[in-house]
Image (cartoon, coloured by chain):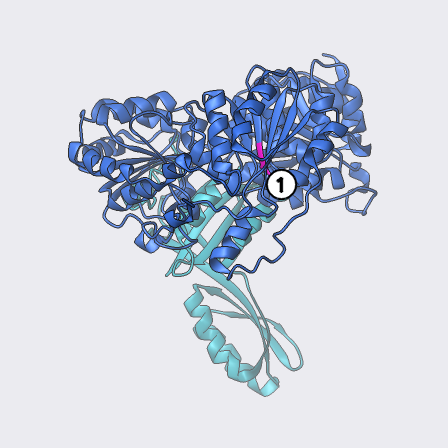
């Protein structure tokens, strides 16, 4: 058995977990680990701010389905990562964060760069560890990856004091099976009896509807969902994070539900007699007013997390456990069905769809973001990985970029983290180097993390960046317009010339303000070998429609007024 | 109504903090929380009392089950249990009044465990109602100080705490509640 230092053991374990890239930033308390890293076949991506590191690990995990790893020093390095951990926590993303900590002898003494990192990250991690003894390090690291992946995934933080990184031990990689203390409490598979009752309920339904969420992707249940939906001819509505879990262009796909979902999608939810909620958690952004939510339906909840059952919406049958397994058991028990009357009703409503109208508009008063995103979808044939920021452009992306494949929309859903797109795209590109990766960001969010442009250049990554600049914090402005008497408090925002910022990093920059120029610039950028940034100067006061105001009834959507369209 | 949850947790630094942090973060309102050793080293036992009119007991239980350090969690509200609370009550009393306090204590099977010049300390054990009853009788005498442990609970008879069957007992019935028959099977 070799005698190794904690810092070496860290990488021995990471390599055995299949880690080949780490996003991080060095500093005093993590120096021994960085020094040891040079001996191991792990590529380190130097970020420009530790928030970028945690978002990159998150983007890496979303694009690949593997655990993303980020690393920082103690104190400010660790606290800077918190936004990324909270983002990963809300969206159930498997991330392992390694942080340096001051030496065990001085913990609690307010030493230089000391923060109680396990304390401050407790509510934004699935679990965390402070390693007080090097002998504990191997099994803690193994367990950290296991916890991150297992059940409902999530971020796990391992805080390693500097003296533990330097301490040595006879290292042998543990091989005993991991059994978490709470593991017996959490159900892996739904019981057959419940599956049978669910099948009966499904066979009797007249107006069933599948609500497909992030769990479809996390469980890898795309094929099972498709098989179930096709056998029963059940329509499929998607949550924002469920996008890609079912092909957008499949005839049974209705599209996104909720606050900015299709009118007919939300109507279908309200009219259904059976909701099949698969790996979704009835978030307030998809339910609107809970008191009037889908009042006449029975509900079957496919869910891996017991604490989500009946949290927001009372359900008739909970199917706890892995969605893929549940569907594998369920599909053979359900009868093939046509649901002709239900589909007739849905198709009639789909023809009235106001979302698609806008695509045919001429827009003489300015370039429309909806058109730019539609043109990107056309140019990339819907095959790109798109990382978005948060706000209007994010909703337009979800409405107008149709994703047929899983893991191609990388977006912060639960936490709604501005500044997410650029670092998440870097993580996605590291995970899927052959994929075409696009950033879609607004002028506000992009300025939060644009320092990571340097990371793109240093790593020689081919990432294309689209900034939809409307001169406002657009979604907040939209709420001010609709709900605060159009008093635009602090939403007009100055931006630098993004193209010149890009140039300063050696990245070609473009500025486009006419629809006629969109396709050309997209072609040019796509065929160029390196990264590029395009600023689209778009209509300033466009708004995302349709819209369910926060807390309103799902059927009471604000629709785009057709009179807005000039003749 | 009051729900009683019994949890077995790893006896490690920070575990109580994780439980308390969970309650704060999820806005769970707890009536009492007691922690102590069990017969097994490295395992602590918690008794948690919540008012299910304000806080859904199932959601509390399910969230506790998600904490990695929680070994077992069970809602024993609808099972036959013995529940005890203990109080130490310091009452203002001069030499002339001690006999009356002693009589009251005897009725409640309480004990006087300390006598000062102008006070006595009464120790009482029982369910919460019994202790509340004694407290109300002593209050007019002048309570100087009181401390209560909060409820501890144990199943009656041969039933021991359930050793989970490896399939999770969050089967959830049609109401999503943990099934009543999730009661101990390993008698």
Is residue A519 something one can see in this rendering? Answer: yes
Tell me if residue A249 comes above or below residue B45 in the rendering: above
Residue A49 x %, y %: 72, 35
Labels in figure, total: 1
Residue A462 is situated, as x and y percent measured from the top left of the image, at 63, 19
Report the chain holding disc 1.
A
Q: B183 left or right of A180?
A: left
Position above or below: B157 against B164: below
Outermost residue toward the bottom in this view: B96
Reply yes or no: does residue A393 show up in magenta.
Answer: no
Residue A523: which quarter of the image?
Answer: top right
Near mark 1 (Cα within 10 A), the count class, few <14, some 14-19 or many ≥20, is many
Query: Residue A301 location, x and y as percent?
Result: 33, 38
Colour in which chain B is shown?
A: cyan
Q: Main secondary structure of the magenta part?
A: strand
* Chain A drawing hue: blue
Is residue A399 toward the left or the right of residue A58 in the image? Answer: left
Instruction: Give the magenta part as a residue range.
Output: A440-444
Tell me which corner region of the image, top left, top right, bottom left or bottom right, holds residue B141: bottom right
Q: Nearer the viewer, residue A549 or A233?
A: A549
Residue wearing tag 1: A443
Whether residue B12 is visible to the viewer of this picture, yes or no, is no
């Amino acid at each position: 058995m070799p005698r190794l230092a904690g810092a070496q053991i860290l990488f021995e374990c990471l390599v055995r977990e299949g880690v080949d890239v780490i996003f991080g930033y060095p500093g005093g308390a993590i120096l021994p680990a960085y020094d040891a890293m040079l001996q191991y076949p792990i590529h380190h991506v130097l970020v420009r701010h530790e928030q970028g590191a945690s978002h990159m690990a998150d983007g890496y995990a979303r694009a690949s389905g593997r655990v993303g790893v980020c690393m920082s020093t103690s104190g400010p390095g660790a606290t800077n990562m918190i936004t990324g951990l909270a983002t990963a926590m809300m969206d159930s993303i498997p991330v392992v964060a390694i942080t340096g900590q001051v030496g065990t002898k001085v913990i609690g003494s307010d030493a230089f760069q000391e923060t109680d990192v396990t304390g401050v990250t407790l509510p934004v991690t699935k679990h965390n560890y402070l390693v007080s003894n090097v002998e504990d390090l191997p099994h803690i690291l193994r367990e950290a990856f296991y916890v991150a992946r297992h059940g409902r995934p999530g971020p796990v933080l391992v805080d390693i004091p500097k003296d533990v990184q330097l301490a040595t031990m006879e290292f042998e990689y543990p091989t005993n099976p991991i059994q978490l203390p709470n593991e017996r409490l959490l159900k892996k598979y739904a019981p057959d009896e419940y599956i049978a009752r669910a099948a009966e309920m499904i066979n009797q339904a007249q107006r069933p509807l599948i609500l497909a969420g992030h769990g479809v992707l996390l469980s890898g249940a795309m094929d099972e969902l498709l098989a179930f939906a096709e056998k029963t001819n059940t329509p499929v509505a998607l949550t924002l994070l469920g996008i890609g879990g079912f092909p957008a262009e499949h005839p049974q796909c209705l599209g996104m539900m909720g606050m900015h979902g299709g009118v007919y999608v939300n109507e279908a939810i309200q009219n259904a007699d059976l909701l099949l909620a698969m790996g979704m958690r009835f978030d307030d952004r998809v339910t609107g007013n809970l008191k009037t939510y889908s009042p006449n339906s029975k509900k079957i909840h496919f869910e891996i997390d017991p604490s989500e059952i009946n949290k927001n919406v009372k359900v008739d049958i909970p199917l706890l456990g892995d969605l893929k397994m549940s569907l594998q058991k369920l599909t053979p028990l359900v009868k093939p069905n046509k649901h002709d009357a239900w589909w007739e009703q849905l198709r009639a409503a789909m023809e009235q769809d106001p979302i698609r109208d806008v695509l045919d508009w001429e827009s003489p008063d300015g370039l429309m973001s909806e058109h730019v995103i539609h043109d990107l979808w056309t140019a990339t044939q819907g095959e790109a990985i798109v990382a978005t920021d948060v706000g209007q452009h994010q909703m337009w992306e979800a409405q107008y970029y149709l994703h047929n494949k899983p893991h191609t929309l990388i977006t912060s859903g639960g936490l709604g983290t501005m500044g997410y797109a650029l670092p998440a795209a870097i993580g996605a590109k590291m995970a899927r180097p052959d994929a075409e990766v696009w950033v879609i960001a607004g002028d506000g969010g992009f300025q939060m993390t644009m320092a990571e442009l340097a990371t793109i250049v240093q790593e020689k990554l081919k990432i294309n960046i689209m900034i939809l600049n409307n001169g406002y914090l657009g979604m907040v402005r939209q709420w001010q317009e609709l709900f605060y008497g159009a008093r635009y408090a602090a939403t007009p925002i100055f931006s630098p010339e993004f193209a010149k910022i890009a140039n300063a990093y050696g990245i070609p920059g473009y500025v486009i303000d006419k629809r006629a120029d969109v396709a050309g610039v997209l072609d040019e950028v796509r065929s160029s070998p390196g990264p590029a940034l395009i600023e689209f100067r778009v209509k300033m006061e466009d708004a995302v429609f349709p819209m369910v105001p926060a807390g309103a009834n799902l059927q009471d959507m604000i629709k785009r007024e057709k009179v807005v369209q000039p003749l | 109504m009051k729900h009683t949850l019994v949890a077995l947790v790893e006896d490690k630094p920070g575990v109580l903090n994780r439980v308390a942090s969970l309650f704060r973060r999820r806005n769970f309102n707890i009536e009492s929380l007691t922690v102590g050793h069990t017969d097994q080293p490295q395992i602590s036992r918690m008794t948690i009392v919540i008012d299910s009119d304000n806080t859904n007991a199932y959601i509390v239980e399910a969230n506790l089950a998600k904490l990695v350090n929680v070994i077992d969690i069970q809602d024993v509200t609808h099972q036959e249990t013995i529940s005890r609370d203990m109080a130490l009550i310091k009452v203002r009393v001069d030499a002339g009044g001690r006999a009356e306090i002693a009589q009251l204590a005897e009725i409640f099977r309480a004990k006087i465990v300390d006598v000062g010049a102008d006070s006595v300390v009464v120790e009482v054990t029982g369910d919460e109602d019994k202790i509340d009853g004694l407290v109300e009788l002593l209050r007019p005498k002048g309570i100087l100080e009181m401390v209560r442990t909060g409820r501890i609970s144990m199943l009656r008879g041969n039933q021991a705490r359930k050793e989970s069957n490896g399939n999770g007992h969050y089967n959830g019935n049609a109401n999503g509640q943990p099934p009543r028959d999730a009661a101990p099977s390993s008698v």
